[in-house]
Image (tube, helix red, strand yellow):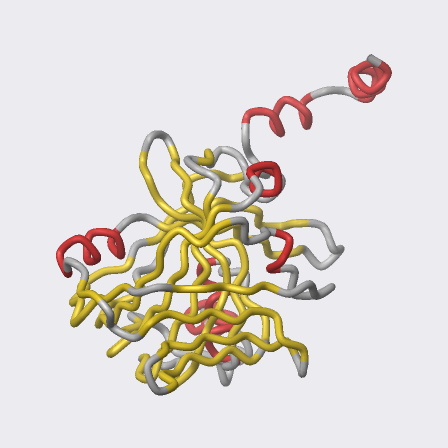
Amino acid sequence: MKHEFVRTNAFAMPLTNPAFPSGPYRFVNREYFIIQYRTDPEALRRIVPEPLELTQPVVNYEFIRMPDSTGFGDYTESGQVIPVSYQGEAGSFVHQMYLNDHPPIAGGRELWGFPKKLAQPKLAVEIDTLVGTLNYGSVRIATGTMGYKHRALDVAVETRKLAAPNFLLKIIPHVDGTARICELVRFHLEDITVKGAWTGPAALDLYSHALAPVAELPVLQVLSAKHVIADLTLGLGSVVHDYLHSPAIARWRGADAGDLVEASAG
């Protein structure tokens, strides 16, 4: 295998049989169940990285059913997304996500920096109730419920919300275990067609787990819930902040050993 072949064909691992295809990634009948709740603002401050700024002490807990996605197949996802702003632009920071399909785990982490881990989420209608659950192994982590299609929402409003920017913290380690890539990434959902959107009474319970700590952002009050079905394309991202090449890091790297000793002593 020639050097140039490796350079030309390398976009994902393994080189000769990548875990996911190249994009674009189109989703048909993507189904969202999102419960917004008020939480502890101090807990949020420990999680949201600069230069993102918190806008309010709320979290969107999401269950997402994806029955038809290009290259990724049929899978379900669940996790927490936090409303933030970046340089005055409102958006969302994806804090943690759990799903049951390897290609979008690999692709999500490698391409964008999605914080994805393997678990067992489900989203289904049970008689008159929309039910979302998340298990990590055999342990229940989250349960969300909402009255099924009680009231319709404005499709145009929900389309604008889905089109807002999303932010991720992408971390890829070097072979020595240090961070080789540590970036704040922004991406958008594109070509959005909302087929329906509804709301209803809702409830959310989160449970403690050492490796799936969704309960560290506790539910203090459920504020709203919605059920949205849409076709959309997951757009590729752009880097808006590089933590390894920020001005502060550059100053630190430019200091000599004496400066560093003096700074630490001070």
- The reply, left or right, for residue 78 in relation to residue 230 is right
Of the pair 190 and 93, the residue shown nearer to us: 93
Residue 261 falls in which quadrant of the image?
top right
Spot occupied by residue 263 in the image (x, y as percentages of width and height): 79, 16
Residue 227, horizontal then vertical, whole percent: 30, 68
Residue at 18% x, 65% y: name it: 152
Q: Residue at x 30, y 54 (%)?
A: 188
Q: Above or below — where is 56 with respect to 223? A: above
Left or right, 136 with reference to 247: right
Please state which of residues 207 and 14 is positioned toward the viewer in this rendering: 207
The residue that appears at 51% across and 78% down in the rendered structure is 121
The residue lying toward the viewer, choosing from 181 and 254, is: 181
Q: Is residue 223 visible?
A: yes
Q: Which of the pair 8/89 is nearer the observer?
A: 89
Q: Is residue 212 above or below residue 182?
A: below
The x and y percentages for residue 86 are: 39, 35
Horizontal side of residue 117 vs 262, given as left or right: left
Q: Looking at the image, how many numbered discs can be counted on the residues?
A: 0
Q: Quadrant of the C terminus?
A: top right
**Residue 254 picture location, percent across and down:** 67, 23
Q: Say whether residue 5 is visible.
A: no
* Residue 151 position (above or below residue 120): above
